[in-house]
Amino acid sequence: MYNDVDLAQKARSSSMDNYRYAFEKEFINKWIERMDKDQSIFSKIMDDEEFKEIMMLEMMRRVYERQSEI
């Protein structure tokens, strides 16, 4: 996700609150792509809203900080 050009552009031009909308969509898409590689974590993220929120927010914070520096 660090290398996603569209997300990086949004990170540089948006607050983290606005960035969240784009990030959340990509977060779900990336986990769907990886579903076959780790079914247990995929199921946990899809079935447990609290866990998904924690994972997404932490990943979003890290990706946003890194991309907004570029």
Image (cartoon, helix red, strand yellow):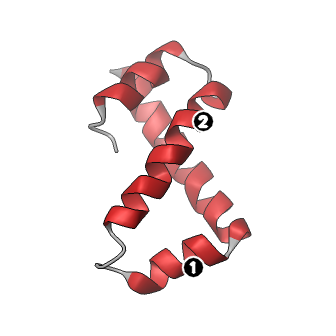
> Is any part of residue 60 visible from this angle?
no
Point out residue 44 in the picture as x, y percentages from the top left corner: 57, 79
Residue sitting at 30 percent across and 36 percent down?
4
Q: Which three-letter amino acid code belongs to the residue tagged 1? A: Lys
**Disc marking residue 21:** 2
Point out residue 40 in the picture as x, y percentages from the top left corner: 46, 86
Q: Secondary structure at mark 1?
A: helix
> Is any part of residue 24 visible from this angle?
yes
Determine the CA span between mark 1 and mark 2.
Answer: 21 Å
**Disc marking residue 44:** 1
Which badge, 1 or 2, is on the more N-terminal residue? 2
Q: Residues within 10 Å of mark 2 (few under 14, many from 20)?
A: few
Query: Is 60 in front, or is 23?
Result: 23
Residue sitting at 61 percent across and 50 percent down?
57
Quarter of the image where the N terminus is located: top left
Point out residue 31 in the picture as x, y percentages from the top left corner: 41, 63
Query: In the visual, does 66 lie left or right of 48?
Result: left
As drawn, which residue projects farthest toward the top? 13
Query: In the visual, does 51 lie left or right of 7?
Result: right
Query: Is 1 in front, or is 24?
Result: 24
As drawn, which residue projects farthest toward the bottom? 40
Q: Quadrant of residue 37?
A: bottom left
Q: Which three-letter amino acid code belongs to the residue tagged 2? A: Tyr
Query: Is 32 in front, or is 55?
Result: 32
